[in-house]
Amino acid sequence: MRAPGTERTGVGRWCLRHLQWVPAFLLVGGAALDYNTPPHFSAEAFYTAAPMSAAALLSLRATILAGIGACAADTALLIHFGFLGDSGGQSELATVTTVSAFAVVVNRLMYYSNVRLESARRIALAVQRAVLPRPPASIGPLRIAVRYQSAVKDAQIGGDLYGVQDTPYGVRCLVGDVRGKGMDAVKAVDVAMGVFREAADDEPAITAVSARLERALRREAERRNGVERTEGFVTSILAGIPHSGDELQLLNRGHPAPLLLHGGRARYAEPSEPALPLGLADLGAGEDRTDTVPFPPGTTLLLYTDGLTEARDRAGVFYDPGARLTGREFSGPDALLDALLADVARHTGGCITDDLVLLAITRSEDPGAAR
């Protein structure tokens, strides 16, 4: 049995794939309607719509051809009914000709707008690669994969962040989500990632890395004028994976609990004590506490932002990665993330409402891959 809405989704996709035929359908349909209706009925609306739709959907050449076709069809039908010499017929033809010429102008304006947009996309992608570089595919026995998906179409960077770094103290990972959107969120991402890269190499303990992130984000918030004290906080999770051994450390600052996947089983690594997000430590008491969890060969650590757990279907049911991944096994972290994104798309009907970062790290079962 098909899921609800599948038929409508299929029809929508078919329509999108065949949009380029809209101008031709308008011309043929308009001419047929004009020919088979009483003489005083005009299909002028179809003739003007054809070149305008071509301007939005097709190339300059196709737009010109659609305009010529509209003028030719209108002229032929006016001659057929004997209205070409009438003022009404001449006015109709003048309208179709004017709209066709204007369609060419619109097509050029849209083309140059798309050129500027594509340039902005390339710049945004360069910014993303500088701020959030893709981690190596492997570090010692660890295989690594990451996916970033923005809720805003064509956006390349937002308020979610990730980082993986090989350090003298092991592999350090950070996944986080900045409160808010826009340039303030991007600035917070930039600050957090810069501090993480430096602190991960300098600090023996991930609690010290967290403390430096806390101080940096608080300084950044204090520099802003007229912004709430609580703006710019970051829910985050830090992971420390030693170069040897079968355990890892997690430090959760108000972030969704990561998943540990092994042998078809999926379990959440919930923090032993709740903690406030980065940037809000002064609102609570207590120091950061890490949790040590088993991480034997063959295990995958899945870190993600709340764009995953807050993804909803048409009935408003939230996506539960633990339940959806239980009983499934994957050849590696890339296969896991690809399958997870496809499953989320099916669950939401392709409607992602929040940015989404997925980071998967698998400890290889091959002893020869050890560092």
Image (tube, rainbow, N blue to C red):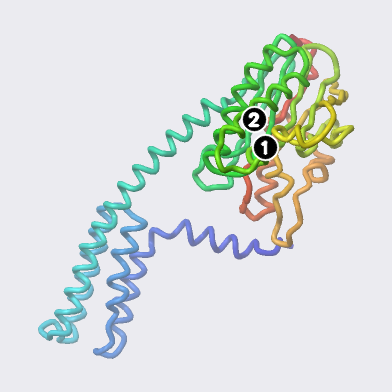
Q: Is residue 149 above or below residue 312?
A: above
What x and y, as percent, mark residue 21?
Answer: 38, 62
Left/right placement of residue 108 relative to residue 172 reads: left
Specify the quadrant that holds the N terminus: bottom right
| Amino acid type, callout 2 | Leu
Residue ID at (54%, 62%): 12
What is the crowding at mark 1: few (fewer than 14 residues within 10 Å), some, or many (at least 20)? Answer: many
- x%, y% of residue 176? 68, 34
Viewer-side residue, 2 vs 226: 226
Foreground residue, 272 or 147? 272
**Residue 67 picture quarter:** bottom left
Residue position for label 2: 217
Front position in the image: 205 or 261 = 205
The residue lying at 74 percent from left, 14 percent from top is 170
Please tell me the numbered disc located at residue 233. 1
- The percent position of residue 65, horizontal first and vertical second, equals 24, 60
Among the 4 quarters of the image, the one containing residue 324: top right
| Identity, as a three-letter code, of the amino acid under mark 1 | Phe
Q: Local crowd at mark 2 within 10 Å, few (<14), some, or many (≥20)?
A: many
